[in-house]
Image (cartoon, rainbow, N blue to C red):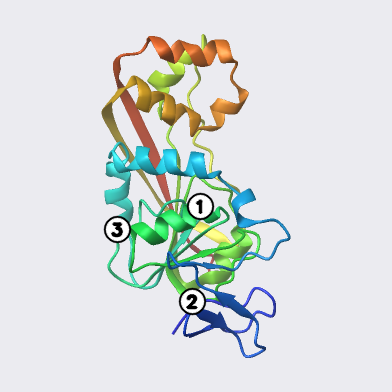
């Protein structure tokens, strides 16, 4: 049975032909690429989240395998009914069980749905996830805003959330090229009250990356928007470098009261 709920009235959504409908007859049609838009907004899904161009650039970059070590580690943690929170293009969704994934970007969700035909993808907002309470065994959350209240709500009592954040040395060689005084990441995780930390795991690897892919990667980071054109241009001098990818996977469970 679907874990999806109506974003209007919160009643269970059921599949009827090419639509999802609730008992109050709110209806949401599937797109031709197999996903459904459950985002309640006056804005077009094309105007929300990543642009088509940036979504496709991210999709092409990830397919080259630079983050495969993280993909492998995340896949090993997926059990039961899985929810990929802010799923992007679905790159990490290498799972043969029941999987749901959502993102606020319609283009990202379209790419995810095309890449993973067995997944159940939908456009939605992190602030109000249209998923039943206590219905998810494994939630994964990579490089996205943290909404503890919603994450705790959708997890089953014995469910797990795996949240991925940058390790201290993530992309340090790239930052050393762009900045005169590069800094390491602080590895701070969000303060939580409804969840508790079970474990932390570091996944790190050196990858060889060329100039064009390095510039694409830089454009995917928060650094891109607060870096001058002069500093960005320093990447033009790169041929090939060894780059550290460094991730922290934090495992959470609901706090036992």
**Residue found at the very far front of the displayed protein:** 32
**Element type at mark 3:** loop
Q: Nearer the viewer, residue 225 or 114?
A: 114
Q: What residue do we see at 62% from left, 90% from top?
A: 23
The quarter in which the C terminus is drawn is bottom right
Badge 2 marks a residue whose secondary structure is loop
Residue drawn at (33%, 27%) of the image:
244
Please tell me the numbered disc located at residue 94: 3
Side of 130 relative to 8 (left or right)? left
Percent of width and height locating residue 254: 52, 66
Coordinates of residue 10 in the picture (x, y in percent): 65, 79
Question: Which one is closest to the eye, mark 2 or mark 3?
Answer: 3
Residue 48 seen anywhere in this rendered image of the structure = no
Residue bearing the label numbered 1:
107
**Location of residue 21 (image quadrant):** bottom right
Residue neighbourhood size for the residue with mark 3, other residues' Cα within 10 Å, grouped as few (<14), some (14–19), many (≥20): some
Considering only order in the chain, which callout, 1 or 2, is on the residue closer to the N terminus?
Answer: 1
Q: Which residue is mark 2?
A: 135
Please say if 195 is above or below 80: above
Choose the circle earlier in sequence order: 2 or 3. Answer: 3
Q: Which image quadrant for residue 60?
A: top left
- Using the image, determine if residue 88 lies above or below residue 102: above
Question: Nearer the observer, disc 3 or disc 1?
Answer: 1
Sequence order check, earlier mark of 3 and 1 = 3
On-image quarter of the N terminus: bottom left
What kind of element bears circle 1? helix
């Amino acid at each position: 049975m679907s874990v999806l709920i109506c974003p209007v009235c919160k009643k269970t959504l059921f599949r009827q032909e090419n639509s999802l409908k609730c008992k109050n007859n709110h209806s949401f049609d599937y797109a031709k690429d197999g996903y459904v838009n459950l985002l309640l907004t006056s804005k077009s899904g094309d105007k929300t989240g990543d642009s088509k161009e940036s979504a496709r650039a991210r999709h092409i970059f990830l397919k080259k395998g630079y983050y495969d070590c993280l993909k492998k580690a995340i896949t090993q943690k997926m059990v039961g009914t899985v929810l990929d929170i802010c799923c992007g293009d679905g790159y990490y969704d290498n799972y043969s069980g029941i999987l749901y994934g959502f993102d606020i970007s319609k283009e990202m969700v379209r790419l995810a749905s095309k890449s993973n035909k067995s997944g159940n993808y939908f456009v939605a907002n992190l602030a109000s996830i249209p998923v039943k309470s206590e219905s998810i065994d494994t939630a994964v959350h990579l490089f996205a805003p943290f909404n503890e209240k919603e994450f705790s709500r959708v997890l089953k009592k014995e469910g797990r959330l795996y949240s991925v954040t940058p390790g201290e040395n993530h992309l340090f060689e790239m930052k050393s090229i762009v900045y005169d005084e590069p800094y390491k990441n602080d590895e701070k995780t969000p303060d939580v009250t409804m969840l508790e930390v079970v474990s932390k795991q570091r996944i790190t690897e050196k990858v060889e990356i060329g100039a064009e892919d390095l510039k694409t990667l830089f454009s995917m980071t928060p650094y891109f928007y607060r870096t001058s054109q002069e500093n960005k241009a320093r990447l033009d001098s790169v041929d090939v470098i060894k780059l550290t990818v460094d991730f922290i996977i934090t495992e959470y469970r609901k706090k036992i009261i």
